[in-house]
Amino acid sequence: MNILQSGGLKRRAASLLEQTRPEYRKLVTLHAAVSVGVMLVISLIQLLLNQITSNESGLSGMGASAVFSTAKATLGLISGILLPFWEIGVLYTSVRVTRRQEAEFLHLTRGFRRWGVVLRFYLLLILLYIVAVMFLSNLIPVIMIFYPMSQTLEDSLTAVISENSTDSVAMMEAVMQAGVMDYILPIVVIFMVLLAAVLLWLSYRIRMSQYLLVDDPAMPAIPSLIVSNQMTKGHKWSLCKLDLSFWWYYLLQLGVAAISFGPELLMLAGVTLPISANVEFFLFQLLYGIAYVAVVWFFGAYVQTTYACAYDELRNPPQDNTVITV
């Protein structure tokens, strides 16, 4: 029998939060605030580097510009590498809360303290998705078989290629003008839909692997993927329904994320603020950070605890296999 029920998991999460508030909510919010704070600091440094670069001129300025550009790219790369290690810590903290164990700031650093295993896990994850994409790319010829090119387009392309065989640039321009995009676009759409479906299915198979890594100190990277696959067998649809039940939370996060694209949205709307582009960029990043932390403060702990409850029930299912109705 399916042991995962969205309503039961949410009621259990709410009950646990009543016992841990405000300590756990503060930890989750602190986790979000640190993430946003690092992002804002990096954005500020990049703005300063942009300002310094724009003031440089001449050959020495070109060298300084190259150095500053490398520094900006390095900052972005470092934050991108460290963020997954930081994000995984809140999962471990949530699991501790579901088991009524003490949760403190040190537990948020769990991902860094298992950095070797976590690094191997993310590398395996990237490799797994690359293999999935490469495998699906072999479906393109099959899609083309079931979506054949019209005889008119085929004759047109043959004529274009023969007329421009010595000029590759002219040939590509002529091919695009021949209407080949009208043929390619549906194939790309079909491929992207299939790719999204496969990657979504794969993501549910490995959904619990991150929890396993931080929950079990002896769990290596590859076994975490295998065990997660076993744990989610028969429960993927239940996890999907749990995700769908939080549609409002993800919609709220999407709205908050849109704030970070404020300058671009204002540009599309034809609105110009009486401030410099750099100040405008940082202002919207700051507003995004405040809104993001606010959303996490009010709803983040509840959502994180619900998912941790789902992991806990899959990891330690009730002995009598009864449905959770906490």
Image: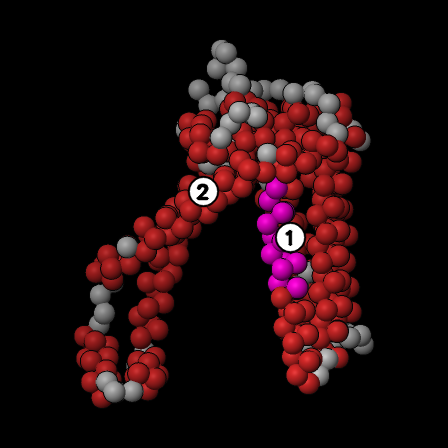
**Left-right relation of 245 to 172:** right
As drawn, 269 above or below 198? below
- Magenta span dominant secondary structure: helix
Tell me the quarter of the picture where residue 311 sits: top right
> Going from the N terminus, do you reach mark 2 or mark 1 first?
1
In the rendered image, residue 174, in percent from the top left (x then y), is placed at: 31, 84
**Left-right relation of 297 to 251:** right
> Can residue 200 be found in the magenta stretch?
no
> Can residue 73 be found in the magenta stretch?
yes
Query: What range is drawn magenta here?
Result: 71-85
Q: Amino acid at mark 2?
A: Leu
Badge number at residue 79: 1
Separation of disc 2 and disc 1 at Cα? 20 Å
In the rendered image, residue 230, in percent from the top left (x then y), is placed at: 42, 27
Report the residue at 66% width, 83% height from top.
59
Q: Amino acid at mark 1?
A: Ser
The colour mode here is secondary structure
The quadrant of the picture occupied by the N terminus is: top left
Does dot 1 land on a helix, a strand or a loop?
helix
As drawn, 313 above or below 284? above
Residue with the mark numbered 2: 124
Mark 2 near mark 1, Cβ–Cβ under 8 Å?
A: no
Report the residue at 20% width, 80% height from top.
158
**Left-right relation of 69 to 52:** left
As drawn, 187 above or below 81? below
**Left-right relation of 297 to 82:** right
Whether residue 9 can be seen here:
no
- Seen from the viewer's position, the closer of residues 48 and 13 is 48
